């Protein structure tokens, strides 16, 4: 093993121009913005997502700002399904023959409680957020190795170093998956140095970013706010009561509208939007950083967790975060 690292992908005078980038979860949010910004710099882009319509909009936006000759490939795939990811990689290989950048970005929320949530919901969340990273890295490894240089960018979360959304919200499936993504990426640093020296890896840990993740997660888990059943509404009432909120005066339709408004506020009122987050990520890749924190809240929380690791699930820690306005504990 040598300490002489190859130049970071995208760090040269041409930036990302002429490279091929793959982005999972490219239909909305940070995935869409990564595709748009990479295409604008002259990279060809391949994206996968569950929604063909959302990917079509990403393709339109990416090509609108891209120089002539840039290609955008879209492919419907569920990243938790290894066969579907392998088929996506085959399509990319047939079109481009190589990949310089792999952004394992796809993810959803849900499956908060190991105790009260359905196993299917819990595992659906874990298998997309972790399984998608694993399947995609394996499937695209030959194409990354076929390039002169390759870089894997795995999206973890602040929940990859702090497994919580606050003292009243269970958050086990998502947090477990994001810890797995973080550990996997850190292990790849040495693995690649030893066994694939043309490859490097980065782990991305965003804070609260304004994306469609809450709304998309609801669709994937068949729990869109407008379609919530009476039983699902009753479960929401129970959870809200556990947090000290009285919804006895609200109708079921009021609850549905309230959940929709909460999800939209998560997207619209975030301290950082998806476009800015994508820029931070790409700047980190260009700089060759293996650990990319995204958002002031991510930086602050990282410092606090490191300073008092034994206290980070105590009420006093949550009070400290609330006093600094670091986290919005309204979701869950």
Image (cartoon, helix red, strand yellow):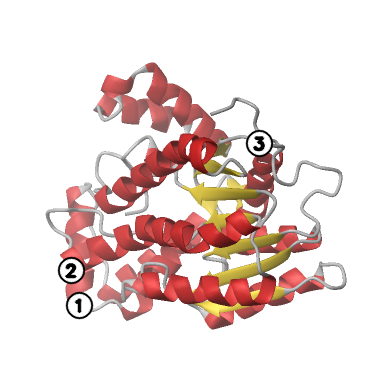
**Residue 246 location (% of width, % of height):** 22, 55
Q: Residue furthest toward the top? A: 307
Image-quadrant location for residue 121: bottom left
Q: Give how far apart the Cα atoms at labels 3 and 1 are.
A: 50 Å
Q: Quadrant of residue 146?
A: bottom right
Q: Which residue occupies the foreground of this view, 257 or 288?
A: 288
Q: Disc 1 designates what residue?
A: 230
> Which residue is at a point 54% across and 75% down the rendered structure image?
90
Q: CA distance from mark 2 to mark 3?
A: 49 Å
Residue 330 visible in rendering: yes
Q: Which residue is mark 2?
A: 234
Residue 62 horizontal side relative to residue 158, left or right: right
Asked if one can make out residue 326 in the rendered structure from this viewpoint, the answer is no
Where 235 sits versus 137, above or below?
below
Query: What residue do we see at 51% from left, 41% from top?
Result: 192
SS class of the residue under badge 3?
loop
Contact between marks 2 and 1 (CB within 8 A): the answer is yes
**Residue 203, horizontal then vertical, whole percent:** 51, 42
* Front residue (pair 85, 144): 144
Numbered tag placed on residue 43 in the rendering = none
- Work out whether mark 2 precedes mark 3 in sequence or the reverse, and give the earlier one: 2
Residue sitting at the far left: 115
Q: Which residue is mark 3?
A: 288
Q: Position of residue 16 (x, y in %)?
A: 76, 53
Left or right, 88 with respect to 43, comes to: left
């Amino acid at each position: 093993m040598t300490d002489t690292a190859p130049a970071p992908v995208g760090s040269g005078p041409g930036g990302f121009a002429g490279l091929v980038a793959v982005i999972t979860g490219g239909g909305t949010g940070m995935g869409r913005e990564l595709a748009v910004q990479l295409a604008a710099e002259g990279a060809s882009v391949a994206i996968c997502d569950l929604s063909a319509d959302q990917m079509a909009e990403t393709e339109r936006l990416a090509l609108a700002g891209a120089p002539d000759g840039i290609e955008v490939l879209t492919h419907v795939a569920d990243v938790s399904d290894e066969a579907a990811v392998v088929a996506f990689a085959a399509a990319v290989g047939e079109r481009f023959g190589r990949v310089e950048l792999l952004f394992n970005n796809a993810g959803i929320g849900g499956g908060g409680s190991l105790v009260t949530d359905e196993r299917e919901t819990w595992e659906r969340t874990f298998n997309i957020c972790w399984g998608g990273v694993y399947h995609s890295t394996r499937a695209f490894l030959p194409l990354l190795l076929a390039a002169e240089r390759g870089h894997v960018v795995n999206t973890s979360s602040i929940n990859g170093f702090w497994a919580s959304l606050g003292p009243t919200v269970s958050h086990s499936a998502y947090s477990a998956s994001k810890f797995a993504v973080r550990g996997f990426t850190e292990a790849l640093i040495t693995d690649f140095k030893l066994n694939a020296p043309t490859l490097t890896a980065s782990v991305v840990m965003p804070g609260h970013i304004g994306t469609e993740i809450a709304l998309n997660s609801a669709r994937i888990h068949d729990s869109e706010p407008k379609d919530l059943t009476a039983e699902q509404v009753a479960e929401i009432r129970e959870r809200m009561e556990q947090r000290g909120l009285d919804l006895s005066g609200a109708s079921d339709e009021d609850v549905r509208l309230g959940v929709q408004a909460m999800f939209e506020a998560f997207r619209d009122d975030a301290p950082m939007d998806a476009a800015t987050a994508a820029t931070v990520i790409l700047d980190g890749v260009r700089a060759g950083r293996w650990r990319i924190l995204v958002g002031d809240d991510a930086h602050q929380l990282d410092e606090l967790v490191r300073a008092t690791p034994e206290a980070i699930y105590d009420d006093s820690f949550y009070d400290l975060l609330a006093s600094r306005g670091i986290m919005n504990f309204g979701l869950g």
